[in-house]
Amino acid sequence: MNKINNQVLSELEEIVPSHRMLMKKADLYSYSYDASFGEYLPDVVIQPQQIEEISKIIILANRYQIPIYPRGSATSLSGGSLPTEGGIVLDMSQYPMSITIDKENMLAIVTPSVITSHIHNEAEEYGLFYPPDPSSSNVSTIGGNILENSSGPKGLKYGTTKEYVIGLQLVTPTGEIVQTGRDTLLIEHGGQD
C-alpha cells in the first residue's frame, strides 16, 4: 500500500529539492532491483546530499510509517537495498564524495558514496593497504560494503569490512545523528592496550 501521498511529498520537498526526488515510473524501475534476483518498486527515490537531510527524512518516514531502504551502487547479491515494501529508497550514490587518508593514524575518512577501489588506490599512495576487496570494488560504494559486510577473496586472510570500521557518523532509526568509535587505531602490545 502506497503511503506516499501529496502531504508526504510536500513535506519531503521541504527537506530536499524536487530535482533530487525521483517519482517517474522509469526512474522507479531503475531502483527496483540490484544484482540479486528480486524486483520491488519503490514509491519514491530520494538523493540526499547532507546528513541532516537523511535525519529529517527518517523522522518524517517514522511519523508516516514509511519504510526506508538505503542504497549505494546496488551491487548487492543479497537484495539488501530492495524496497520490498515500497516506500523510500535513499540513493546514497549521489552523496558528495570525500576521502581523506590520515597516514599517521592509518585511517581513511570517507563518505558513504566513495567507490571502494578509490580507497584502495588512495591508501596505496600513502604506503597503506585496505584489505576488503569485493569483486564489485570498482563500482560498489563503501557505504554499501559496510551495510553488507563485504569482503572478497582477501576476506579469508584479512577479514571483512566490519573489521576495518572503527568509527561512523550515522543516523539512527529514530533520526538522531550520532558519532561512534574513535579516530585513532589501538594497537595491542603483549595483551595490553
Image (cartoon, helix red, strand yellow):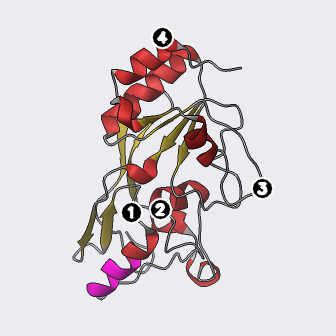
Counting residues from the N terminus, which is met first, the one under dot 4 or under dot 1? 4
Q: Is residue 121 magenta?
A: yes
Q: Position of residue 184 (x, y in %)?
A: 29, 65
Disc with the residue nearer the chain's start (4 vs 3): 4
Tag in front: 4 or 2: 4
In the picture of the structure, the residue carrying the numbered disc 2 is: 141
What residue is shown with label 1?
Answer: 114
Whichever of labels 2 and 3 marks the residue nearer the N terminus, that label is 3
Q: Looking at the image, do the residues carrying marks 4 and 3 touch, with CB atoms under 8 Å apart? A: no
Circle 3 sits on which residue? Answer: 37
Q: Amino acid at mark 2?
A: Thr
Quadrant of the snapshot with the C terminus: bottom left
Separation of marks 4 and 2 at Cα, in angstroms: 33 Å
Residue 78 higher or lower than 42, as above or below: below
Mark 3 is on which residue type?
A: Phe
Q: Quadrant of residue 52?
A: top left
In the image shown, does 5 or 133 lie closer to the viewer? 5
Amino acid type indicated by mark 1: Val
Binning the other alpha carbons within 10 Å of mark 3 as few (below 14), some (14 to 19) or many (20 upward) gives few
Asked which secondary structure carries label 1, the reply is loop
Q: Which mark is residue 7?
A: 4
- Residue 146 screen position, x and y as percent: 52, 58
Residue 4's spot in the image, x, y percent?
A: 57, 19
For residue 176, say whether it is visible: no
Q: Which type of secondary structure does the marked residue at label 4 adopt?
A: helix
Q: Above or below — where is 69 with respect to 65? A: below
User: In front: mark 4 or mark 1?
Assistant: 4
